[in-house]
Image (cartoon, grey):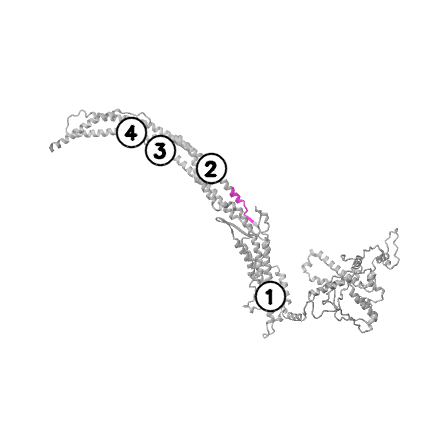
């Protein structure tokens, strides 16, 4: 109201214009003396208050809420009550009702107006020939009636404003024309009215709030509050936590009740121009216009036909429908095929098979509730409330069952709608279940786990299919799994029987199935498409996360294996192996420290298998290097031990002759002076390998024994050398003694050969037989001398081996020289003796 313009300036309360006495040109009450400290009397305060705000209601009267203006008239209680109906009836009295007058008909002149409907609510239309029946008290009544009629037209506070006496023709106007007429009429009325001033608004508000006492108004009936309470659930009425709110709302309702009645009384009183003048209120706020548009075509006949048809065929308003609705909202309102809240509160993410099992389990449980509870409960309602529908049944076998069939068809449609609503809400919940990740899972590298704090839904494993990393299940399989979730909901909503199948068991065999959502419907495809968009946005992150494993591609494509093979083919020091193993170990530890679960919005990657596989590949490379050194160590240690064994066996042999003895002595000397030192250098290498292996390898028991044997050999071989050295020295001494003895015996043998050769010098002429014996003896001597020569060479060789001075044995050479003449002599003689007879006889 403060927005309304006001042409007159605001006048304060101190200005005497607000004083009734001043306005009536009467002297005012003198002010109280300044010296008095007493409170002014009640009468003085009342008079002063009335001087500012003239009273609106009588303080004392026979009836409650009697206007102040009535005290100037002598009216009984009944007459005062009648005065409240309208201004035109304010002078009616019960005693005048005994005089019967002919009713006077006032014809409101028909004005040609723009075709249109009257303004509704705020502007009530008058018919073409509106008749007002008044008591024929005389011209005074007629005059007052005209005055009241003029007031009703010009007053903006009257709830019914006559816009025009002319009604539209037979053809209704269009809605646009109707609203145009309404707006035009509102503008005409507004142009004729004067906006209330600030003073008018302030005084009007004062009388609305303070002009009427509450005890003048009849209190609101208790039944009203009782009816309101019926519309509120009992759980809210009895809730202790809502008790303060309930008290506040009840108090607010009472205040609104009294305020509305006070405003209505003030508005009615101010309809009287004399009261406005007395209360110094020229204009009051205009009510906000309410507009109602009538249909542009005649509809009464159509309405009657539709109403009749609805009464016979519209079963939606049947009480059973309300019972079914109340049952649904009371017990099955929160039922869902997939309990997404339970999924979110449970253990997430789920393995693909776990997700599928949970969806199937939830859907099956919801289906069992529908089959075992909803349908039987609905059937029980029909049985317990059959008075609401049994009249549709045919009264006899000859009556048509069309009505009952139509009724239960409507029931089936209603229950099908409830079932569809359940399916649609379940689909919506499932979409919302995935929509929490509608932002997708793209991320700025490097990956930060804290960016994805929402619970993930499905677990996907990363596995190695040489030479690439793959998702298990694949994203196509994941989408098929998600899509099947929607189909599973629809699948479990099918084949739900109608309630007739329980009420009328004899109808079994008919197609009594409730309708539900079809998979080909657009809303299903829309839900699936929404989820597919979310699914596509959540594919980016997993593929992007694979970049983390790019630097390990050599482990996947066997390049690392080939590099190790090439490395092992080359000769490298132990330090090179240590560097390479440490590098591999560092990579393995890096892989082992990577995330084993990677949250990525909708999906969670399970990288445990992949990380384990990569760690195993790195470990295999490391083990290969270590095993190479283990094999080298085993082979080298075996070779060293074999050399020690060979030396030990060789020096422990018993020489069969001097040559072997000398050879052993030389071998012993070389082994102790050269070979052992070479082996010790190899032992130092073995020590380095062993230190390496002790850091990186777990040696088998055989290798441990081999290493122990290896490092015991240096001391053992020295003992063997010492024993062999003593033995060989003894053998050498014995060989020298044997050689001396052998030389002596050889000289004796030569002396005997010499004596035998000298015996051929003294031989004379002998017979042929004797010559033969001599030849044979000489031949035998030649053989002995040859053997002696060989023995001589052996003695010289042995002396040479023993590093002794060689013996010459000059007698041997003399014997060989002396033997030749004798041998030739006797051999020639013997041959001549034999051949001479042959020569003589042949001649």
Position of 83 with respect to 638 (left or right) is right
Residue 279 percent coordinates (x, y): 82, 60
* C-alpha distance separating marks 4 and 3: 23 Å
Q: Are marks 4 and 2 in contact (CB under 8 Å)?
A: no
Looking at the rendered structure, the secondary structure element under dot 4 is: helix
Q: Quadrant of residue 265?
A: bottom right
Residue drawn at x 24%, y 29% is 786
- Residue picked out by circle 1: 413
Q: Quadrant of residue 338?
A: bottom right
Q: Which mark is residue 653?
A: 3
- Residue picked out by circle 2: 574
Q: Which mark is residue 794?
A: 4
**Residue 616 can be seen, yes or no:** no
Instruction: Give the number of the mark in front: 4 or 2.
Output: 2
Residue 10 percent coordinates (x, y): 81, 55
Q: Are marks 4 and 3 in contact (CB under 8 Å)?
A: no
């Amino acid at each position: 109201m403060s927005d309304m313009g006001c042409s007159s300036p605001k006048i304060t309360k101190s200005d005497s214009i607000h004083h009734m006495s001043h306005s009536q040109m009467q002297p005012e009450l003198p002010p109280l003396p300044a010296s008095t400290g007493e409170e002014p009397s009640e009468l003085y305060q009342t008079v002063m208050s009335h001087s500012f705000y003239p009273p609106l209601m009588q303080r004392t009267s026979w009836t409650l809420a009697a206007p102040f203006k009535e005290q100037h008239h002598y009216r009984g209680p009944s007459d005062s009550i009648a005065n409240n109906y309208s201004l035109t009836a304010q002078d009616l009295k019960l005693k005048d009702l005994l005089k019967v007058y002919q009713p006077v008909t006032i014809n409101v002149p028909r004005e040609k107006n723009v075709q249109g409907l009257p303004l509704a609510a705020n502007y009530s239309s008058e018919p073409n020939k509106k008749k007002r029946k008044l008591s024929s008290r005389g011209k005074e009544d007629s005059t007052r009636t005209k005055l009241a009629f003029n007031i009703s037209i010009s007053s903006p506070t009257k709830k019914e404003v006559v816009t025009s006496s002319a009604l539209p023709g037979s053809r209704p106007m269009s809605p646009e024309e109707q609203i145009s007429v309404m707006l035009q009429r509102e503008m005409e009325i507004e142009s004729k009215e004067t906006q209330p001033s600030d003073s008018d608004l302030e005084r009007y508000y004062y009388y609305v709030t303070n002009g009427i006492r509450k005890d003048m108004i009849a209190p609101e009936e208790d039944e009203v509050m009782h009816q309101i309470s019926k519309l509120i659930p009992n759980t809210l009425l009895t809730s202790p936590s809502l008790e303060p709110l309930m008290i506040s709302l009840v108090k607010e309702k009472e205040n609104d009740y009294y305020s509305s009645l006070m405003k209505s009384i003030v508005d009615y009183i101010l309809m009287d121009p004399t009261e406005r003048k007395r209360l110094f209120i020229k204009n009051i706020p205009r009510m906000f216009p309410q507009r109602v548009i009538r249909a542009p075509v005649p509809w009464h006949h159509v309405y009657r036909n539709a109403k009749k048809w609805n009464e016979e065929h519209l079963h939606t308003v049947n009480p059973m429908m309300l019972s079914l609705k109340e049952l649904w909202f009371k017990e099955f309102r929160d039922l869902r095929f997939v309990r997404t809240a339970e999924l979110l509160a449970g253990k997430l993410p789920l393995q693909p098979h776990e997700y599928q099992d949970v969806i199937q389990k939830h859907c099956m449980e919801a289906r069992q509730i529908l089959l075992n509870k909803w349908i039987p409960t609905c059937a029980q309602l029909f049985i317990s409330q059959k008075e609401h529908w049994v009249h549709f049944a045919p009264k006899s076998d000859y009556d048509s069952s069309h009505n009952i069939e139509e009724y239960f068809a409507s029931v089936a449609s209603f229950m099908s709608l409830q079932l569809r609503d359940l399916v649609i809400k379940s689909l919506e919940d499932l979409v919302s279940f995935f929509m929490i990740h509608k932002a997708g899972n793209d991320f700025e590298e490097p990956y930060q786990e804290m960016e994805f704090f929402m619970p993930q839904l499905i677990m996907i494993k990363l596995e190695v299919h040489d030479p690439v990393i793959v998702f298990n299940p694949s994203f196509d399989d994941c989408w098929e799994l998600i899509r099947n979730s929607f189909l599973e909901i629809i699948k479990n909503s099918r084949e739900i029987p109608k309630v007739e199948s329980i009420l009328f068991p004899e109808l079994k065999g008919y197609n009594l199935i409730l309708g539900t959502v079809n998979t080909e419907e657009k809303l299903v495809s829309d839900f699936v498409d929404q989820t597919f968009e979310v699914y596509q946005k959540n594919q980016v992150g997993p593929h992007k996360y694979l970049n983390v494993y790019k630097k390990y591609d050599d482990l996947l494509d066997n390049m690392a294996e080939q590099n190790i093979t090439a490395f092992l083919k080359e000769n490298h020091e132990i330090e090179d192996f240590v560097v390479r193993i440490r590098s591999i170990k560092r990579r393995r530890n890096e892989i082992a420290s990577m995330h084993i679960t990677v949250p990525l919005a909708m999906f969670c990657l399970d990288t445990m298998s992949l990380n384990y596989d990569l760690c195993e590949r790195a470990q295999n490379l490391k083990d290969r290097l270590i095993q190479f050194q283990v094999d080298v160590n085993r082979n080298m240690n075996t070779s060293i031990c074999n050399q020690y064994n060979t030396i030990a066996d060789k020096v422990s042999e018993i020489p069969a002759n001097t040559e072997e003895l000398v050879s052993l002595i030389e071998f012993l000397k070389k082994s102790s002076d050269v070979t052992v030192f070479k082996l010790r250098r190899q032992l130092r290498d073995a020590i380095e390998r062993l230190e390496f292996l002790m850091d990186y390898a777990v040696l088998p028991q055989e290798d441990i024994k081999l290493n122990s044997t290896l490092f015991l050999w240096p001391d053992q071989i020295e003992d063997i050398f010492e024993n062999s050295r003593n033995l060989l020295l003894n053998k050498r001494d014995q060989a020298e003694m044997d050689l001396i003895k052998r030389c002596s015996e050889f000289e004796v043998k030569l002396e005997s050969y010499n004596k035998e050769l000298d015996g051929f010098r003294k031989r004379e002429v002998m017979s042929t037989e004797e010559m033969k014996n001599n030849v044979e003896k000489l031949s035998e001597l030649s053989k002995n001398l040859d053997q002696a020569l060989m023995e001589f060479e052996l003695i010289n060789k042995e002396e040479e081996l023993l590093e002794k001075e060689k013996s010459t044995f000059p007698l041997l050479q003399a014997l060989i020289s002396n033997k030749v003449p004798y041998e030739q002599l006797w051999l020639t003689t013997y041959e001549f003796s034999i051949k001479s007879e042959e020569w003589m006889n042949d001649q």
